[in-house]
Image (cartoon, rainbow, N blue to C red):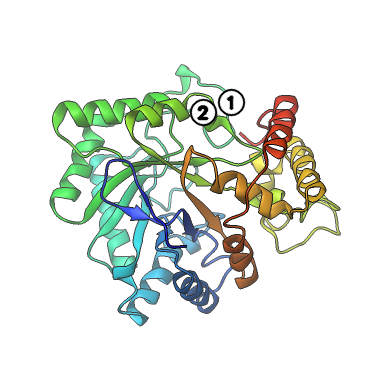
Amino acid sequence: MNNTVRLGQSDLHVTPICLGTMTFGEQVNEADSHAILDRSLARGVNFIDTAEMYSVPARAETFGATETIIGNWFAKNPGARSKLVVATKVAGPSRGMPWVREGKGMTAADIVASCEGSLRRLQTDVIDLYQIHWPERHVPAFGNLYYDPAKETSQTPIREQLDALAGLVKAGKVRYIGLSNETPYGVHEFVRLAEQHGLPRVATVQNPYCLVNRTWENGLDETCHRLGVSLLAYSPLGFGLLTGKYDQHAPTDPGAPQEARIARYESVRKQRWGRPEALAAARRYNQLARDNGMTPTQMALAFCYTKWQVASTIIGVTSMAQLNEDLNAWGTTLSPEVLQAIDAIRWELRDPAL
């Protein structure tokens, strides 16, 4: 993987595959996490993504565990940090996680304190890409379909958030900033205020993008294309739905792979990836892959790897075998006929894991 892509208008150049790490510290122990990091770097991936709230599913006991594991790996491998673009995230308002911070919102002081905590755990002097994990204001995200003004609880204007991030950039603790789980309004407002006030311009938006969730293509694609902001696509395999592992047995069936996320964690089953409609759609896509001589994983990743909308695709793994499979899917191309068949399924079933 010799080619790199530029993120937004920044000078960050990353591989089109990013290693996501939210399984580290929950499904993957520290030794295996370090082995996966070793292999990923050896195979040419120069981009890793984490967050202060990881591991996932989020628990008080594992808060910050993923960053700590990565930081320990940096300490063991002194040359590794300089070879990597490191992205992490400040959590938005609590969403039922009081251990992240005491207040319910995400103040300027929270942003600074969270950044300091991430720097300590990562054992690094600078974060290359610092992202807001989800908006401080109320938005329909994580499976919610509709915007509801009555649920608005925003207390920290976007301008204040940008000012706090600008301070971190000025102090040399953050190089560039990004957003996650955002809407077209949010991206426009962050860019508008940055340009109006000479503040850091967002380089990226990290949102879900996969065969069972293509909501990015309903407005955010044009927004980010015209504003020069890059998509970091997360959950390209739909939390495992698009690997085929649940094609024979649904996550709640005794025959389902019990170590896989949707089967293992009730909290995940309650989310968008656990919907029966999402599984039904995934099974259709997975069969389409097999009918065209591909594994479900190959087709699902190729869909993200080759779409113009995607700058870098974030893969999450729990084993070396999964890492190799995901990296080996690079270079798989989809014929016009397969792409048409994918669009036909979407036309019928839309985005069941939005």
Q: Regarding mark 1 in the picture, which secondary structure is present there?
A: loop
173 vs 41, nearest the viewer: 41
Q: For mark 1, does the 10 Å Cα neighbourhood hold few (<14), some (14 to 19), or many (20 or more) residues?
A: few
Residue under the point 55% across and 76% down: 32
Residue under the point 60% across and 63% down: 328
Mark 1 and 2 residues: CB-CB less than 8 Å, in contact?
Answer: yes
Give residue 56's position: percent from left, percent from top: 54, 56
Residue bearing mark 1: 145
Q: Is residue 26 left or right of residue 183?
A: right
Q: Is residue 323 left or right of residue 85?
A: right
Instruction: Inspect this view and state whether residue 157 appears.
Output: no
Instruction: Inspect this view and state whether residue 111 appears.
Output: yes
18 vs 148, nearest the viewer: 18
Residue type at mark 1 is Leu
Give residue 212's position: percent from left, percent from top: 66, 38
Compared to residue 227, the image places residue 292 above or below, namely: below
